[in-house]
Amino acid sequence: MAQPGQSFSIFLPAVEATMPFSQIIGQLKALSLLRRALHGGRLAHGYLFTGPEGVGKSTTARALAAKLLCEQKDSGPPCGFCPGCRKSTAGSHPDFLLIRPEGAGIKINQIRELKKALTFPPFERGMRAVIIEDAQSMGREAGNSLLKLLEEPPPDNIILLIASDAEPMLETIVSRCQVIPFAPLTEAQTEQIIRRTHPQLSQEEARLLTKLTGGCPGRADALHSSEALNLHKECLDALLAGAASEAAAVEQALALAGRLAELKDDLNHFLDLLSLFFKEVMTDALCGREPQEAHALAAREHWSLQRLSAIVEAAESARSDLARNCSRALVCEVLLLDMFCG
């Protein structure tokens, strides 16, 4: 049985990052459904939060769990001061369980351990909240084991499944849960979240990440931590500064190409950044808008529309070559030489 502080397939993590529903940006439909269920005392025993990665499913699940574990049973947010809230924040609440995939997916043994833990009533004589992340990664065996739990749920337990809509869930599990769909956020909502979670970003960086995430601000962490953003900025700085000679431009292009080829999966992020930046500069020029960021303003003054279009075409050509399994090193060299010496 899971005990506070143990860490095997059931985790008891700290919940200090949890925020109340009122501070969650977007997902008004999902939040409205959960608020009505809370206020009316009609919570289902199992929920399935489904939608793209990074749109707030886990944040909402943790907010609901924090509310259920708070000992102040009113309509407001978690009080933050009661024993339940303090234990949640310290990561020691015995009635908050989180299951994550082990390796490629959630294993049958993890579900068996969960079922053993749920044979006992909640320790604090309130509700127990169970969050299962990446629920779509469950194999059929683990899914069928969970299905039995959902068919005969023990009292005072709520199971929150979080799943990406990129992979199908077992229909039998879906049918036993109340499905709460989550959708991509608006661009304004996405940028608001990114600015809140990454206050160190410049206006230009925050806007670029907003565009790249496609309404899924949770993806910004991976994008920001990748080398693609830094290398994109370095390339722009070098291009706009200009090289002292053609030989220097070739040397600079090849040096950056070598680093670019090492990005692996982040190489596509770099190409996304490149295409997005130059397309927006072109759009501003065609629409007569004055760019707001320094790089965009300099690029508009530095290159003609024809040259901007050529760089976008070079980036798209590089993406196409990579899809055909061409040499990464060669693709990067051709791209950077085109940009610096074209």
Image (cartoon, rainbow, N blue to C red):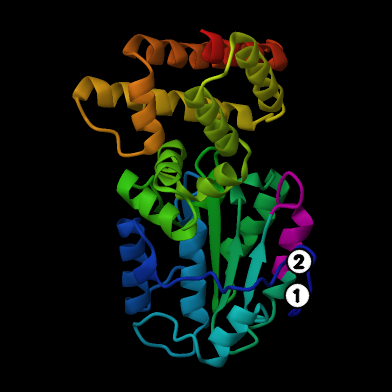
Q: Three-letter amino acid code at disc 2? A: Glu
Image quadrant of residue 322? top right
Residue 212 relative to residue 256: left or right: left
Image quadrant of residue 31? bottom left
Neighbor class of circle 1 (other Cα within 10 Å; few <14, some 14-19, many 20+) is: some
Mark 2 secondary-structure assignment: helix
Q: Is residue 106 above or below residue 214?
A: below
Q: Is residue 227 above or below residue 59?
A: above
Q: Position of residue 107 (x, y in %)?
A: 75, 52
Residue 186, magenta (yes or no): no
Residue 109, magenta (yes or no): yes
Q: Which residue is mark 2?
A: 113
| Region in magenta | 101-115
Rounded to the nearest angstrom, the CA distance separating label 1 from label 2 is: 8 Å
For the point 27% across and 27% down, the residue is 284
For the point 58% across and 86% down, the residue is 86
Neighbor class of circle 2 (other Cα within 10 Å; few <14, some 14-19, many 20+) is: some
Residue 286 relative to residue 341: left or right: left
Q: Earlier in the sequence, mark 1 or mark 2?
A: 1
Instruction: Looking at the picture, tell me which residue is in the foreground, 321 or 30.
Output: 321
Q: Which residue is mark 1?
A: 2
Between label 1 and label 2, give the one nearer the viewer: 1
| Tag 1 near tag 2, CB within 8 Å | yes
Mark 1 secondary-structure assignment: loop
Q: Is residue 170 visible?
A: no
